[in-house]
Image: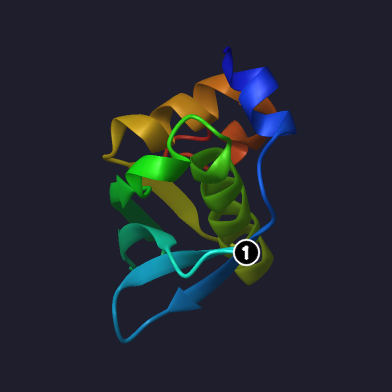
Amino acid sequence: MNPSEAEGLAPAVEVSYLPEEGRFVGTIEGSDEVAFIEVQPGPTEWVFGYTQVPGAWQGKGVGMALVRGAVAQVRAMGGLRIRPECPFVAAFFRRYPEEADLLRGGGS
């Protein structure tokens, strides 16, 4: 199954930023499991580190929904850039180049 097909089957993922834990957490609808991205916020740049999706949810669009929600929240904060250190997050920006303006250097 390719990623586009997987995303179409993805359950709803509610993304929340938990500053005290240094991560964005994705609550998966109908499950007690969560996915997360570890982040290091800075005054102008946020580093997106390790991403984890529970095994049963891998390949079902949960990770992409998590990253999309986290990116949207950083965008809403205004004036920030993202430095993806996680290969999965970097893949998100390659797949969705319209979001690349948030990358350090503006994605150019």
Please identify the quadrant where the N terminus is shown: top right
Position of residue 47 relative to residue 76, above or below, is above
Q: Residue at x 26, y 40 (%)?
A: 85
Position of residue 87 relative to residue 77, above or below, is above
Q: Residue at x 40, y 30 (%)?
A: 90
User: Given the image, on which type of amino acid does mark 1 rest?
Assistant: Gly
Residue that badge 1 annotates: 30
Q: Picture coordinates of residue 34 (x, y %)? A: 43, 63
The answer to which of 23 and 5 lies nearer the viewer is: 5
Q: Picture coordinates of residue 60 (x, y %)? A: 55, 34
Residue 108 visible to the viewer = no
Q: Residue at x 58, y 32 (%)?
A: 100
The answer to which of 89 and 42 lies nearer the viewer is: 89
Q: Residue at x 43, y 36 (%)?
A: 58
The answer to which of 6 and 83 lies nearer the viewer is: 6
| 58 left or right, relative to 94 | left
Q: Say which element carries label 1.
A: loop
Position of residue 29 relative to residue 5, above or below, is below
Q: Residues within 10 Å of mark 1 (few under 14, many from 20)?
A: few
Q: Residue furthest bottom?
A: 20
Q: Picture coordinates of residue 27 (x, y %)? A: 54, 67
